[in-house]
Image: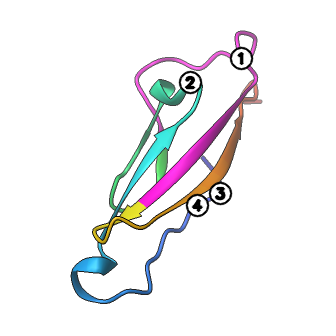
Amino acid sequence: MNNPIQVSDRDEGVNAEFKVEIKGDGWDRFRVDPSTGRVYVGNIPLDREEKSSYALELVARDSGNLSSTVPLRITIDDGK
């Protein structure tokens, strides 16, 4: 993944802590660090000929139970 995803919370103290999860069709092919929001390829191999892109969502939820959702599109190339 070449483009970093940044997650921040302007609250202070406990409410500044958050968890990030990934949702959508194919979410199980990726993993997300729940405390940073960084997305990684998971243990299931990716094959562009099987599926060339994934339309996912990242959901960040703080400990005050407020959340924000953003779209995330991951495009698979041949690695050339």
Mark closer to the chain start, 4 or 2 = 4
Q: Is residue 66 visible?
A: yes
Which amino acid does the dot numbered 1 rest on? Answer: Lys
Q: Assign a secondary structure to mark 3.
A: loop
Q: CA distance from mark 1 to mark 4?
A: 22 Å
Which quarter of the rendering shows the C terminus? top right
Label 4 Cα neighbours within 10 Å, binned few <14 / some 14-19 / many ≥20: few
Which amino acid does the dot numbered 4 rest on? Answer: Pro
Which amino acid does the dot numbered 2 rest on? Answer: Gly
Q: Picture coordinates of residue 67 (x, y %)?
A: 46, 63
Q: Nearer the viewer, mark 4 or mark 2?
A: 2
Q: Assign a secondary structure to mark 1.
A: loop
Which amino acid does the dot numbered 3 rest on? Answer: Asn
Answer left or right for 57 relative to 27: right
Q: Are marks 1 and 3 in contact (CB under 8 Å)?
A: no
Q: Picture coordinates of residue 78 (x, y %)?
A: 75, 24
Answer left or right for 43 relative to 74: left
Q: Picture coordinates of residue 6 (x, y %)?
A: 54, 68
Label 1 Cα neighbours within 10 Å, binned few <14 / some 14-19 / many ≥20: few
Q: Label 1 belongs to which residue? A: 51
Mark closer to the chain start, 1 or 2 = 2
Residue drawn at (65%, 15%), measured in percent from left and top? 47
Asked if residue 37 lies in the magenta stretch, the reply is: no
Instruction: Give above or below for 63 relative to 10.
Output: above
Residue drawn at (71%, 17%), measured in percent from left and top? 51
Q: CA distance from mark 4 to mark 2?
A: 20 Å
Region in magenta: 40-60
Q: Assign a secondary structure to mark 2.
A: loop
Mark closer to the chain start, 1 or 3 = 3
Q: Label 2 belongs to which residue? A: 26
Label 2 Cα neighbours within 10 Å, binned few <14 / some 14-19 / many ≥20: few
